[in-house]
Image (cartoon, rainbow, N blue to C red):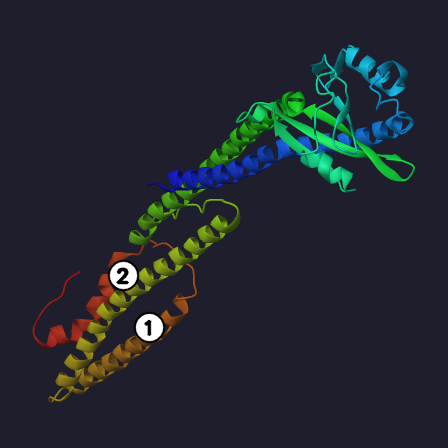
Amino acid sequence: MRLGLRLLFAFFLVNGIAAFFVLSVFMGEIKPSAREVMEDMMVDTAHVLAELASDDLGAGRLHQGDAAESRFATHMRQYAQRTVNARIWGLDKRTLDYRIYLIDASGRVLLDSQGEAQGQDFSQWRDVVLTLRGEYGARSTRSIPGDDSSSVMHVSAPVWVEGRIAGVLTVAKPNRTVQAFIDRAEHRLFTQGLWMLVLSAGVGVAVTLWMVWNVRRLRSYAQRVQGPLDDPGAVPPEVPNVPGELGDLAQAMEQMRRRLQGHDYIESYVKALTHELKSPVSALRGAGELLQEDLPEADRRMFARQVVQQSERLQHLIERLLELSKLEQRAPLHPATAVALEDCVRTALHQVQARAQQRGIALVC
């Protein structure tokens, strides 16, 4: 698998896992948060209504079941008959969804805003039992068993009369009344999450393409570097201008190229000097052999001079060999320049002229 595909796959994997967990956490918290807010509002409502019902309950008007004499019952009945047309953050509300129960200390329903549960025994319900004990009472009960969408939240508050709990006021509200808000929030969160995922994917693709493009520039540079290493006269490729660590890598490759090219120059230089050393050594040995024989004074001085010249030449070559250590830290040598071949030939003939004459050999340039 290529580098670009690996980077893209890794980016999508990490991004997808992160987006999945973030969306799942947020979407999982929407419904509980909405119901928590609804319960908080119902607590306030239950306590306000319990305070309003305390006068009628203490006077016994609700115990007699005579709604005409109970102002609280009349108001609750009028509340149930109200109509509403409210637009809340883009959603229409057409009904009033509170259902209000007033329950006496024995658990019997004295008042139901819908007029259906009056006289029933609610003493077994958790919210009523806890409230009569002076504790916070609340419950959520399904109207249809097994159907979570039919659940109704009940919040109760005590009705105090002369310092004692004389009854319970319960406010009930179906959870489905806030489901539209929950669905809209989940839809918006899911949609925005998808857009964020698409945007981050685009950023990932752009970063991957940028990375792959710069890496390919480095690869092309490394491939083109081989030419200058093989051919000292070739022009080295330009170092690619890439940012960050990739730029440091390009500079390191350029330094490596220079060092390798310097080694190649040193190798070729050593070969050339080694070849040059053979000539003066051979000349010295020949001159030494001839000096061991009986020679005329002129020839002896000529061969002695030749020994000195070849010794000087050896000294020069040795000094050049010592300079090789300095080439390690130098840039490539200067390009080759034109040389007069005739001068080189005449110099070489002069060095072996004496030996050739001794052996009867004529040298002609």
- Quarter of the figure with the C terminus: bottom left
**Amino acid beneath label 1:** Leu
Q: Residue at x 54, y 28 (%)?
A: 194
What x and y, as percent, mark residue 289?
A: 13, 84
- Look at mark 2 in the image and give the residue it sits on: 343
Q: Quadrant of residue 8?
A: top left
What x and y, as percent, mark residue 272?
A: 26, 65
Q: Considering only order in the chain, which callout, 1 or 2, is on the residue closer to the N terminus?
A: 1
Mark 2 against mark 1, which lies toward the viewer?
Answer: 1
What x and y, as percent, mark residue 100?
A: 76, 23
Residue 364, numbered circle: none
Q: Secondary structure at mark 2?
A: helix
What x and y, as percent, mark residue 290?
A: 13, 84
Outermost residue, front side: 64
**10 Å crowding of disc 1: few (<14), some (14-19), many (20+):** some
From the viewer's perspective, tell me whether residue 70 is left or right of residue 245.
right
- Look at mark 1 in the image and give the residue it sits on: 321
The answer to whether one can see residue 157 in this image is: yes
Residue 290 against residue 139 in the figure, above or below: below
